[in-house]
Amino acid sequence: MNLDRIIAVRNNKTIYRDGSCSVKVFENGYSQPEIYREAYIQTLMRSIGLKVPKVEQVTEINGKTAIVFEYIPGRSLADMISSYPDECEKFSEILADAQYKISQKKASIRLLKEFISDSLAKSDLSEQEQNELTDLLNSFPQKEELLHGELIPQNIVITRDGTPYIIDWEYASQGDVCYGHAATCISLLADGNNQAVRYYLDTVYDKYSIASEEIVKWMPLASVTLSMGYFGNTRQFLLDHVHSLIGRNGGNI
C-alpha cells in the first residue's frame, strides 16, 4: 500500500489515501475488538441503506491495525464551513438532517446507556461526579433510535453532487436522538463553532420539533463520552464542560 498521502489525523488515528481506498491506521490505545467493531458497524450501516463508505478489509500495516475502506471523493463538511462561513446555516441543516435520517433506521447494536456507563467507569471524574452523572443517565428512559454518536462536520463528506457520506462510526449506539444532537452541539462548541450550534438547534426545533432544552440535558453525558477519545485542549474543554454542568442537569449554550 502507498501511504504517502495523509488525508486526516484524528485522536490517535491517521487516515491515508491509497488510490480508490482510504486507510485508517490506529495507533496504540485501540484494542482489536474496538477496531473490528467499528468496521462491523460501518458495514452494517451501509447494509441498512445509509450513505457510508464500503469497508474492504481490516489488516495490519507496519505492526498497526488498519481499516481499509472505499475512498469518497469530496470535501468534509468541516472544510466547507471553514471556506464558506456565510453558508453556516445551510451546513448546520445538513448536519441536522443527517442526524434525523440515521435515527429513522433500525439496527441492533449496543445500547447508549451501556456505552455511557462504561465511559463513566473509565473516566477521570471523581466518584461523586460519576454518581451524579449516573443518576442523570438513569433519569432518562431507554430508547432505541440509531445514533452515530459523533456526528460532527469532520465526519461528513460531501460529494460533487451534494450527497453526504458519513464516516467514523466508533461511537454508534441505540438510544435517545437527543443525545446525538447533544454530542453534535458540544463538539461544535469545542471547535469554537458557536454560531453553527445556534443554527443547528433552530433547525432541529423547526423541522423535528425537538426543543433545545431536551438536548441540553444530555450535554454533560455527551461531553464525558466524547472526552474519552480526545486529547489536549479539546479533552480539557469537554471535561471543564462536565464540571460546570454537574448538579444542574444541563446548562446554557
Image: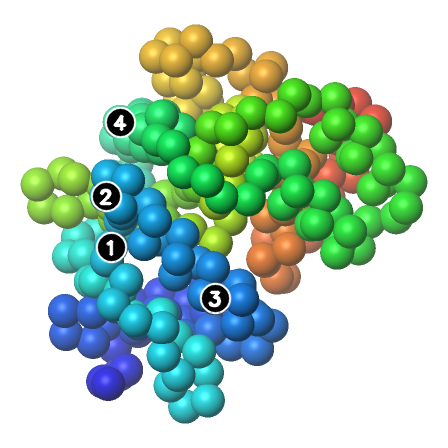
Q: Is mark 4 on a helix, strand or loop?
A: helix
Q: Is residue 54 left or right of residue 147?
A: left
Circles 3 and 4: CB atoms closer than 8 Å = no
Q: Position of residue 57 (x, y in %)?
A: 30, 71
Q: What is the three-letter code of the residue carrying label 1?
A: Pro
Q: How far apart are marks 4 and 2 (CA)?
A: 19 Å
| Distance (Cα) linking label 1 and label 4 | 24 Å
Residue pointed to by mark 2? 51
Comes first in the chain, label 1 or label 4: 1
- Choose between 89 and 145: the one closer to the eye: 145
Rounded to the nearest angstrom, the CA distance separating label 3 from label 4 is: 33 Å
Q: Along the line of sight, which residue is nearer the eye, 5 or 136?
A: 136
Q: Which of marks 3 and 2 is nearer the N terminus?
A: 3
Separation (CA) of disc 3 from disc 2: 20 Å
Mark 4, residue position? 90
| Crowd class of label 4 (few under 14; some 14 to 19; many from 20; radius 10 Å) | some
Classify mark 3: helix, strand or loop. helix
Marks 1/3: CA distance?
16 Å
Residue at the (75%, 47%) spot, across then down: 120
Q: In this view, does 101 lie above or below 123?
A: above
Give the residue displayed 41% in from the left and 24% down from the top: 200
Task: Give the label on residue 53, or none.
Answer: 1
The crowding category of the residue bearing disc 3, from other C-alpha atoms within 10 Å (few below 14, some 14 to 19, many at least 20), is some
Contact between labelled residues 4 and 1, with CB atoms less than 8 Å apart: no
